[in-house]
Structures are given as structure tokens and as C-alpha cells.
Image (cartoon, rainbow, N blue to C red):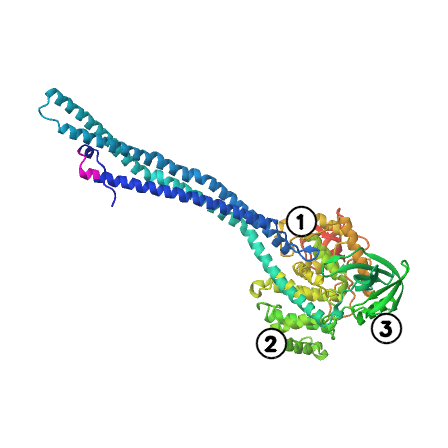
Amino acid sequence: MGLPALEFSDCCLDSPHFRETLKSHEAELDKTNKFIKELIKDGKSLISALKNLSSAKRKFADSLNDFKFQWIGDAETDDEMCIARSLQEFATVLRNLEDERSRMIENASEVLITPLEKFRKEQIGAAREAKKKYDKETEKYCGILEKHLNLSSKKKESQLQEADSQVDLVRQHFYEVSLEYVFKVQEVQERKMFEFVEPLLAFLQGLFTFYHHGYELAKDFGDFKTQLTISIQNTRNRFEGTRSEVESLMKKMKENPLEHKTISPYTMEGYLYVQEKRHFGTSWVKHYCTYQRDSKQITMVPFDQKSGGKGGEDESITLKSCTRRKTDSIEKRFCFDVEAVDRPGVITMQALSEEDRRLWMEAMDGREPVYNSNKDSQNEGTAQLDSIGFSIIRKCIHAVETRGINEQGLYRIVGVNSRVQKLLSVLMDPKAASETETDICAEWEIKTVTSALKTYLRMLPGPLMMYQFQRSFIKAAKLENQETRVSEIHSLVHRLPEKNRQMLQLLMNHLANVANNHKQNLMTVANLGVVFGPTLLRPQEETVAAIMDIKFQNIVIEILIENHEKIFNTVPDVPLTNAQLHLSRKKSSDSKPPSCSERPLTLFHAMPSTEKLEQRNSIINSSLESVSSSANSILNSSSSLQPNMNSSDPNLDVVKPTRPNSLTPFRKAKALYACKAEHDSELSFTAGTIFDNVHPSQEPGWLEGTLNGKTGLIPENYVEFL
């Protein structure tokens, strides 16, 4: 129940009921005053806590912003770039949020503390002052009234009248003070309903503004959060694959370290103890030594592994002779003497073991060094890119596309090894391979079929995309520009031997079909890259650095899948003609939605375009020396980057492009490959399309022709004249 109203008419009577009512109002004002004091104290504590929170969050944001990720290798993938940038993005969001919090804190004192203190001091304080005045007048009035009533009636009439007048004046003044006090109490009680609550509302509005700003920041952060989530998942998937590879390599190194030694530019290298003469006698100092047989140069670096620091200056000498030190001539074991051309005396060295000494001796006395050639981790078996091999792959693909294209985890879930080997033995039987119409029976699970396909590809004598092109493909994946990446990989694919390229095309067409059903089978282009990258592009040398490049192998496969129609159905751009032509007519990549393989990569050392071209040419020239004579004839032919279409395999259907030596105006021409127009002035067509009125255009490398009544541009190297 609320407080009873204070009537002005009761001020004159000043009854006990009036006093009780007034007392209840005074108690409410005291309660309100105490509450406001506590509220102001709590508000100041809240503002102080918010300031401390803001300071802690800013410090946290600064720590996030200062940390920089370091990746393994010479370049980082698009996902790694996104993750590395995430900490700075987090810091930016937190700082932005704290900026808004600072504005809220600055306004909190004005909108909350100051109005409450003002209300307490000016309104409640004024009411308390009025109460003091009212109590004082009450005491004065009561005292005069008692004194007046005690006057003797025997006093003179004039004295009595004067006393009455004085009492009337005091009573009137008391009545006025009572009215003013009641008015003030009533006013404060009414004012607190809005002047007390309004600052609290303003403070809450500031909080709501702050939280709304956080909501808007969260909305703006949503796109990056989605991208970051995908990048984290992709990186986790790559890590799981890479970790198993590194762990496998570590186990192999534990079992037989010499089998997996890194191919070094030096004939021999390792730690040796070198005998040095000192004033007090001789000492043995540990050195890391390298020997180059061609130049006979021995380099000795004093190094202490325990302290992790060099113990002196490097020294290089030219070998003159090396002699095994007999055990009975020195107290130390595993020693040999070295004589240098440019240093007098004999240098006595101690190897780490008898086998280590033997290797150093063989390297230094001119005999052939012991190299451990890198062996493929898979069985070479009888797997070949012949008619049987193509038949096996086609049968596996047919089984997958007809029976299991929508199975979840396709190609990622492996089959039982014994079943896979049994299926391969059946498929590789020449009798079964000759029965081209025979499909894989439904009794074989799809995971067994997919594992058989991958195992067969790993059983080939070398990876499908060849050892000599492995580094070139990796470098292409590390290029910054997506268009350049696709162009480089396009050219490299057409440098592969014909059978390798046809098998790769067969596989990429199939993987594109698998990726098109990723909503059912959950195998996106990125997931397929993780599965097939290490199989199709495995390195010749198994090292940790090579394993760290698996992520770029995956990107190469992603590009092949996403651009398989262009890469396999068109010839690469001819340098300085078609390349410039296509680049000049290429639409901006900004108008296309970026795919997982289209995000740019950042390299440590970015070279000018001319240097990149020279480096690419040098890589191509060096790799040509290691290719077979048939591949050399393909690479050095007048068609430059066009594939060699001469195949003796009856199962391989190949289209032989013919290029006219001269262009005769207004002739008919037939399309060799499919082409999708990238400009309004170009024509779109499929392989086998017939064009009318074909004649040279004003643009180099392009023809002009008519198709279905429409005249447009046609790439010159896409057609043959009839």
C-alpha cells in the first residue's frame, strides 16, 4: 500500500494523524537517500570495473596483434594466410569493441552518477533542510503557545491583546512553514519517480548501444569467421595427412637411417673430431666437415652441439691424400690422416664409428661414393600405363560412378587391404583385362574399388605426374596470381608423356563428377586434393620439407579438377602470341566467386615477371634433359606446348589437330576442342562444330567465322580447315 496523501488543510490542525503521515513520508525520503548513496557507490565501482575490463581486453588484443605465425616452407597456403591473419582480425574486433565501451564509460558519469548526486543533494537535501526549519518553528510555536497560555488573566487588557497578537503571528508563520514543508516533501516524492529513474534508463540505453555495436561487429565478422572456420578445417585435415606421413618417415628413419639419407650436394658430410696441437699437448675438437669430391675441398666448422654455438672460424683445405690410421699407432679408434695441398703437415681425424670411417675413406680416395638412391615407397609390381592399366582404371571409375558416387567419404575411407590386393590381382590378370565388357562385380564394396584404384596408381614405376615435373607443379601452385597458376599447370600437363596425360584426364574427369556430388558424398574439391595429391605428385626424395609441400600438391589437384575441361580439352597458350592474346581478353577474376584454390599465395621473394619467365624456362630446360627421347621429341616439336597425339594403344582415342600453313579467306573449318566464350565478340562451341566463312581477323591469333547466323571470333589453334 502506498503512502497517504499530505493534505494542506491538515497543516493547520497539526493532528497526530497528520504527524504520523508526515513521519512516514520522511522515512521514505531517508530510505531513498540511503539507496541513492549506495547506488552511486555501486555505480562508481561498476565504472571502475568496466575501465579495468577494458584495459585488460586492450592488453589482450595487443598481445594477439603482436603475435606472428611462422609457417614451414618457402610459402604459405591460402588457408594458412587466413589463419595467420586471424589474430590481427581478432585484435581489431576487440579494439573496436573496447573503443565503444570507452565511450560508454565516459558517458556513464554524466548520465548516471551526476544526475543522481544532483537529485540527492538538491531535492532530498532541500527537503531535509525544510524539515529542520519545520522542526525549529514547531518548537518555537509550541514554546510561545505554552508561555501565552500561562499568562495570568489579571494582566492588563493591552498586554493580553499584545500577547494574543504575537501568538497569532507565530501561529501564522508556523502554518506557512508547515505548508512549505509539506509541499516540498510532496514535490520530492513526485520528482523521484522521474528524476531518479531517468538516469538509470539513460545508463541502460548506453549499455544497449554498446551491446548493439557488438552485435553489428559480430555480423560484420561473420564472413571472415566462416572463411576462417573452413580454413581451420582444411588445415586440420592437411595436418592429419601430413602427420601420418611425417610419422611414417620417422619410423623408417629409426629402422634404417642410411636408407633415407638426404641427397646432399656434398660427397660426404658429418661430424669428425680433429686433433689439434696445443701448448700443453694435444686436444680433439669436434668439427662439422663437408667434402666435395669434384673440387677436393674439405670444409671444417668447429661446432659444439651441447652449447649450440660455433667454437671458432671455418676452415677450408684442398685434399691431397687420405690414409687410414692404424690402430696400434694411436690410442684413439676410427682415425685417419689427411694431407692438404694448401696446409703443411698431417691432419688426424677421428670418425664416429668404423662404418663412418669407411665412408669417409671411400669418398676421399677417389672411389665412387656410396649414395642411397631414393626408392619409391610403393611396390613397383607390374603396374603400367598400358591397355591393362587403362582398363583397370576405367572399370574402377565405372563401378564408382554407377554404384557409389553418393557414398559418404568416397576415396577417403579405405578398404580392407587383403580384399584390395585380391581385387587388384583379379583386375591385373591379362585374361580379365582382355574382357573389356566385364564390369567389377557388385560383391566388391565401393571402398575396396576406390582403394584398388589408388593402390594401382601408387604401384606405377613413378607417380602419374612424374618426378621430373614435381617441383615445377609445386612452384606453379605457389604463384600469387590464380590465372598464372592455371596457365602454368596447363602447360606442364601438356609436357607430360601422352599416356600419363590421358590417364590424368580420365582421372580428373571422374574426380570432377565426384566433386559435383559433394553434398551427398561430402568429398569437396579440397578433400579430393588431400586424398590424391600425395599419390599423383609424390616427390622422389622423402623428406620433411617434401612432406610440408603436400599442401601445394593438393592445390595442384584442386586446380586440375576445377579446370579439367580447359586444361585437357585445349592446348596451352603459345608464348608471346596466344598467351598475350588470352591475357588481354581475360575477364577480371574479381567477377568470379573465389574457389578453394583461387586464393592468392604470398612468397618470401617475389621476382619480376621477366625473372619468373627466365626461371620457368630454365626449369623446363633442365627437366628436358632427364626426360626420355620420345618425350624430348614432343617437347621440342614445332607445336611447342601441344601434345603428341601419336599413340599405338588402340584403347586410347586421340584427336590429331592440324594447323594450316596459311589462312585462306572464307573457308569452312571444324572445331578440334570445345571453347566457352569469355567476351561478347567470341563464339562458344563444342568439339566437332562446323564454321562457315572462316577468315583471318584483325586480332592476331584469332579467326572470324559464322555459326548459326552469328559472326564472332574463334581461337586460331582450336580449328582445322576443311
Q: Main secondary structure of the magenta part?
A: helix
- Residue 190 x %, y %: 30, 37
Of the image marks 1 and 2, the number of the one nearer the N terminus = 2
Give the residue type that dot 2 points to.
Answer: Ala
Q: Which mark is residue 328?
A: 3
Task: Name, please, the residue furthest toward the top.
Answer: 158
Crowding around mark 1 (Cα neighbors within 10 Å: few <14, some 14 to 19, many 20+) is: few
Give the residue type that dot 1 points to.
Answer: Lys
Q: Is residue 127 left or right of residue 718?
A: left
State whether residue 311 appears in this view.
Answer: yes
State whether residue 671 appears in this view.
Answer: no
Crowding around mark 3 (Cα neighbors within 10 Å: few <14, some 14 to 19, many 20+) is: few
Q: Is residue 18 magenta?
A: yes
- Using the image as rendered, state which of residue 496 and residue 302 is in the foreground: 302
Q: Is residue 168 left or right of residue 403?
A: left
Q: Would you name the residue on which mark 1 appears?
A: 587
- Using the image as rendered, state which of residue 85 and residue 175 is in the foreground: 175
